[in-house]
Image: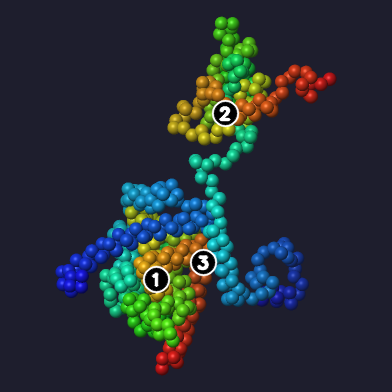
Amino acid sequence: MADEESQVDGKPEHPAPLRGPDEGVPANPEGKRSSVAADLGALATGLKTTLGEFFSPVVTTMYPEEKTPRAERYRGRHYLRRYENGLERCIGCELCAAACPVGCILVIAAENTDEKRVSPGERYAKTYEINMLRCIFCGYCEDACPVQAIVLGPEYELSDTSREKFIYTKEKLLEPLPPDVEARLKSATPHPPASPGTSPQVGK
Amino acid sequence: MSDLYANAIGHWVVVVVAMLILFFVVLTATAYTVWFERVALGRIQRRPGPNRVGPFGLLQLAADGIKAAFKESIVPTKTEHVLFVVAPCIAVAAAFLSWAVIPIGLWYNVTYWIADINIGILLVFAFSSLNVYAIFLGGYASNNKYSLLGGMRAAAQLISYEVALGLSLVPTFMIVGSLRLRDIVGYTVSWGPYHGPIPLILLTPIGFVIYLTAAVAETNRAPFDLPEAEQELIGGFLTEYTGLKFIMYYLAEYVNMITVSALAVLLFFGGWYLWFVPPVLAFLFKVVLLLFLYIWLRGTFPRLRYDMLMRLGWKVLLPLGIVNVIVTGVILVATQG
């Protein structure tokens, strides 16, 4: 009523409210008067919908028994890799620790000697620890590593019972990679070896 | 058996044994109603519902019950201590008392009942109105604004819908001519060649619709669950209740739900008569169907606003109920003289 009167009396001072013709919910859509039959019909539609859902298959993933597939390059827990002859890849350069945005990686390097050769390079990581409570799984360590020593595997169920257990030591990180990840790393090398001729970027 | 029943002491023995069995059966039925509700609601939302404890999650309620029973029994300091503890007891007592007069057909000519009294259905209503005290006193005793609001809502809602609930059944009484539940179940008609029991819903369909709506409101179930209203009243009258006292309210709600469904079966769907099906199975089947209807409603409709609830009760159901009574009366006089 108030609206009609204001329009009859004169032109409204302000332009129409900032609302498009299709916005807002009018009391009676399309000017229809709500009827008991229409209301009951709406109730019936609701009941039909839920009954349809009731007879539809369940979509829940039964988690611990059944897991959704991970993306191929999912970034889960870390692994340190070895060469096929058993030498560790890590050369103790600490680039991963430098790249890490949260500083969760600790590398203490030591020199390789002829009697005790751990990695093919000059140095190796005497200590390699990752604090998994700090890690944000960004994968920058993997990108920074010049010898692809560190990779992020697919495991994401990393719960444990004490904080100390979340500091992954070198022994734990050197566990063998899951075979599918190993196969992927072999087939499509993320950082091609920098030998001229094989890599397109190193042309010239 | 009839000799035993005629003997005064034997009568009491039979009644006490029947009560114990009833208590056990209703408790078990309640547990599985909760399980059924959780599974059915889950299916409506395309979830599996509880499925971890026992086969198909059937022991979930045992686990929940044990957990709640071992919780600390907290009575907040500033509550009315006596009322706070008494209120849930009233809820459970009122819920179980209704079962005293509900008869169940066990086999083709064996019917079970504890009290076969001629005002059976009125007694059920009397006991179910005690539920108002349980909820209102619980809300008042909690000394909490949300509880009090829930309690007030419950009082207004239950009293309003009790009128409609009572009126919805008057045509049934007029047709049958008795308030005794066994008479209503055993109501038979002789229509031409057909002679036998008939589901009374065919004679009073509007009565059933009113009864169903009012019954959902009476048991505080969604979409009429305003006294609890988790979103607005953080649980309403249940806010301060934990552990066993909470479980008692919870139990009472589900027992009431079964009571109301069983009553609907007795009053409108011919009780335990269903062709050749054994009566106890027929009764169970009909009750489960009605319980599913309850759950289905809960899974479908959003909660009503308080004024909508009152409008529906007083302006729709009550006039409809009165008209239903008058029309039934006119038809009865016209057909039977």
**Residue under the point 40% across and 85% down:** B190
Instruction: Estimate the spatial distance between the alpha carbons at disc 3 and disc 2, rounded to whole Å.
Output: 55 Å
* In this rendering, position of residue B6 left or right of residue A32: left
> Dot 3, crowdedness within 10 Å: few (<14), some or many (≥20)?
some
Q: Is residue B225 visible?
A: no
Quadrant holding the C terminus of chain B: bottom left
Residue A178, disc: 2
The colour scheme is: rainbow
Can you give x and y, in whole percent of width and height, for residue B206 in the image?
48, 78
Where, by quadrant of the figure, is residue B330 drawn? bottom left
Report which residue position mark 1 lands on: B276
Report which residue position mark 3 lands on: B304
Q: Marks 1 and 3: same chain? A: yes
Q: Marks 1 and 2: same chain? A: no
Where, by quadrant of the figure, is residue B336 drawn? bottom left
SS class of the residue under badge 2?
loop
SS class of the residue under badge 1?
loop
